[in-house]
Amino acid sequence: EEEGGEESGEDDADVGGAAFERKARQTMAKMAADSTLNQDELRKQFLANASLLPTAEQLKKEAALPPDIPTLKQRVQDVVEMLKDFSAAKKQHPESSRHAYVEQLASDLSACYGYNSELMQLLLQLFSPAEALQFIEASEKPRPMTLRTNTLKTRRRDLAQALIARNVNLDPIAKWSKEGLQVYESAVPVGATPEYLAGHYMIQSASSFLPVLALAPQAGQRVLDMAAAPGGKTSHLAALMANQGTIVANDFNKARVKALQGNLARLGVKNAVVINVDGREFPKTMGGFDRVLLDAPCSGLGVISKDASIKAEKGFQDVQRCQQLQKELLLAAIDSCNANTPGGGYIVYSTCSISAEENETVVDYALKARSVKLVDTGLDFGVEGFTRYRSKRFHASLKFTRRFYPHTHNMDGFFVAKLKKTSNALPASNGNANEQDGSAAGGKRIKPPLLSHAAMRKGSSCNGGKASFKGTGKSVHKKVVGSRFPASSKGRR
């Protein structure tokens, strides 16, 4: 009987517990429904009470006075909220037009944050109004300081312990990086510690890890880093290759080559050859590489937090000028890669720009002009690249590319694409693509015209935190220039 009583008590407790859980779920569901109703009611009230666009007379008065930033920011918030569901706003204000609100939003954002009208228009074409505001606000704040552990000399755990002992507050970046550390605050200059001087780490933005991880070079391979200065990516390549094989580290700006050489020496890189030639001269200078990394000069629209002058100085013309250079460099990078080497034939193209004109447009052009295909970058985060942008339609495989944004990933705006070269032969004529490239219908390559140094100096915007393409065009190591890699050089220091 006692056992029966105990079982009955347990059953009652189970029934009571189930009833409590059911009631709790019902209460939570009711609270969620009430919250949704409240939000809908608040939105209806906002739309009913939202002020219409300022009149021409009000705008004239505003123009005569210094910008009232708080008022402008409030109007920006109101317009963004209205544009989230403009069809509902249209019912409350039938006389309003979306175009007028977007124009006013662009004007107010430019006044609040110091952007020129062309760049603001580009951002509003790239993002929704709400996301454009998020990007702009994120670009006003500096990105976290990050370090890359030089695994040629130490381990991340040992480096972290050494820096913590010097009162540096840090953490690992994220699961996707095995070498990265994020610095929150430091009692000592991070660029002057004994560990830094000994080459145990490189101060490097988190986004610049990504193209090297995507390229994934193997020990013993021959790799070209086409725009290498100041050496962060080159040294990362050397670390992944365990100082085996050969890296040709090229940069067109002779002044930056000195910094490249200094960093490689400090970090203990022994398998790199540094040269100073125009990247567009490859593969005439040398070719036959297993893998090629092109972190192309760009407008720098992803690194506004590092260079606020971009907001006022860059426009459509700068983007178009950079696009022309990037197309020439990417074709040269593809031509420098050997499709027939085991484990080779890969090219990674990256920029620190967010414009589709410098990213998807350039890669789509290369897909038509050369025998390449896009493959998965191996990066398990990031936003898929565009397969359509405004009136343009790109190849469906552009979804394999990856975009990174400051407001989404808390890193510099970046783009990464990984290409696999399928053949060393040029494809048959692909209409306008090959005509623009200068390829004849029979596949014979006609070298595209190079941008003049004067034109590049005039448009020195293609730097994105890098130096513009101007220099002597002469090699630092003259023995390398004009020669191809001998087979016996593999693995040579």
Image: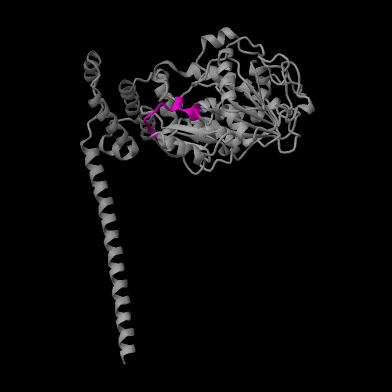
Q: Residue furthest top?
A: 454
Q: Residue 386, percent across and down?
A: 52, 35
- Camera-nearest residue between 421 and 490: 490
Q: Is 111 situated left or right of 171 in this image?
A: left
- Tally of numbered tags: 0
Q: Is 84 situated left or right of 406 in this image?
A: left
> Does 310 lie within the magenta span?
no
Quadrant in the picture for residue 294: top right
- Camera-nearest residue between 249 and 258: 258
Q: Quadrant of the N terminus?
A: bottom left
- Camera-nearest residue between 473 and 390: 473
Q: Residue furthest right?
A: 487
Instruction: Give the magenta part as a residue range.
Output: 184-196
Quadrant in the picture for residue 267: top right
- Camera-nearest residue between 208 and 294: 208
Establish if 340 lies above or below 479: below
Q: Quadrant of the C terminus?
A: top right
User: Which color scheme did the rendering employ for the protein?
Assistant: one colour
Establish if 465 lies above or below 405: above
Q: Residue 87, percent across and down?
A: 33, 39
> Does 189 lie within the magenta span?
yes
Q: Is residue 206 visible?
A: no
Q: Residue 168, percent across and down?
A: 40, 34
Q: Residue 15, percent across and down?
A: 31, 76
Q: Is residue 315 visible?
A: yes
Quadrant in the picture for residue 146: top left
Q: Residue furthest bottom?
A: 1
